Amino acid sequence: MTTLRTLGELQVPAIGFGAMVLSPGMYGEIDDDRGVAALQAAIDNGGTFIDTSDAYGDHSHNERLVGRAIRGRRSEITLATKFGLKLADGEQGHPLKVGFAFEELLVNAEPKYIRTYAEDSLRNLGTDVIDLYYLHFPDPQVPIEDSVGAMAELVADGKVRQLGVSNVTPEELRRASAVHPIAAVQTEWSMWRPVDPELLEVARELGVGVVPWSPLGAGFLTGTVQTLAADDFRNNAPRFDADSLQANNQSYAALQALAADLGITRSQLALAWLLHQDPAVVPIPGSRTPAHIVENLAAAEITLHPDTLARIDAVLARLEPVGATLLQDAR
């Protein structure tokens, strides 16, 4: 299996690195030195496709952390960030229904704000160009064509290289692509959250890469999540409440035998399985532990025989997760 894949005109590692987990309040407390060490471990071991957002952590903490970690190494990195959830003072957000415990997010992707969002991200990241710039969520009060049109101006001005969209419907992906080529679509996809088959079909038709976020089920598929700290963001996901988590751990223990037979970890099984779903898939797992980061990245070297894939799919077909995932689209 090739360890390089293509998103639009970007050539990236088959497995990237999702930096969201490195901000306090996401998966519990963490200090910046540990976050930088995690990012540098990813870069040192080939995880040079780094994904962040201006909304991760207070005051764009995650972007600023990434900027610190890549200082002096920018040429090694394919840098992706997102906009639309971080609202400026006095800026009105538009409610988007989702499946978190708090039921909605506030989004603003009005064209008049998008250049400011991008320029703020450039400063936070310490760079003069963003390789892949995503609309984080479609704005329910703004046609996606208008948002993408404003994003396209950033490409024309050299501030952004490629455009992406995240958490969109198949129809929204098609409409966005009609305005400007879309290099990648982000969507939640893992062994416990199937991809929308129509979204995958449209992405294939249009030549859009698919970047699964939460490819390890927000850490669940590692098999190590038994309880959550009080300040862990996953407490907002019904699938992680105490009863659901216990039930899911019991049923998904079946994956351990599969991984053991293959001589790999459960994380590697989950990532390798995703990579075998389509050659344009580039998952972005995150971790705070260098050893786990190296383990995840090594999944790109694993080849699963068709018989093994059939066996995995047969096991997955018998599993029914309890509760909604980290994001359950309520539109």
Image (cartoon, helix red, strand yellow):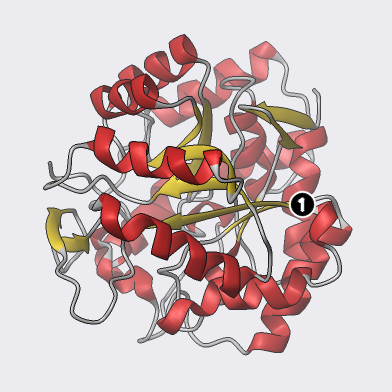
Along the viewing direction, whichever of 193 and 153 lies nearer the viewer: 153
Image quadrant holding the N terminus, namely top right
- Establish if 218 lies above or below 89: above
Question: Left or right of 121: which side holds 107?
Answer: left
Along the viewing direction, whichever of 47 and 159 lies nearer the viewer: 159
x and y, in percent, of residue 197 in the image: 35, 19
Which quadrant holds residue 290? Answer: bottom right
- Establish if 43 lies above or below 186: below
Which residue is drawn at the image coordinates 32% and 20% (left, top)? 174
Which residue is drawn at the image coordinates 35% and 19% (left, top)? 178
x and y, in percent, of residue 90 in the image: 18, 80
Along the viewing direction, whichever of 55 and 22 lies nearer the viewer: 55
Q: Residues within 10 Å of mark 1 (few under 14, many from 20)?
A: many
- Look at the image and tell me whether residue 78 can be seen: yes
- Establish if 78 lies above or below 55: above
Q: Which residue is mark 1?
A: 47
x and y, in percent, of residue 214 in the image: 48, 51
Which quadrant holds residue 286? Answer: bottom right
- Look at the image and tell me whether residue 225 can be seen: no
- Spot the residue most to the front: 157
Q: Helix or strand or loop: what does disc 1 sit on?
A: loop
Along the viewing direction, whichever of 223 and 87 lies nearer the viewer: 87
Question: Left or right of 82: which side holds 328?
Answer: left
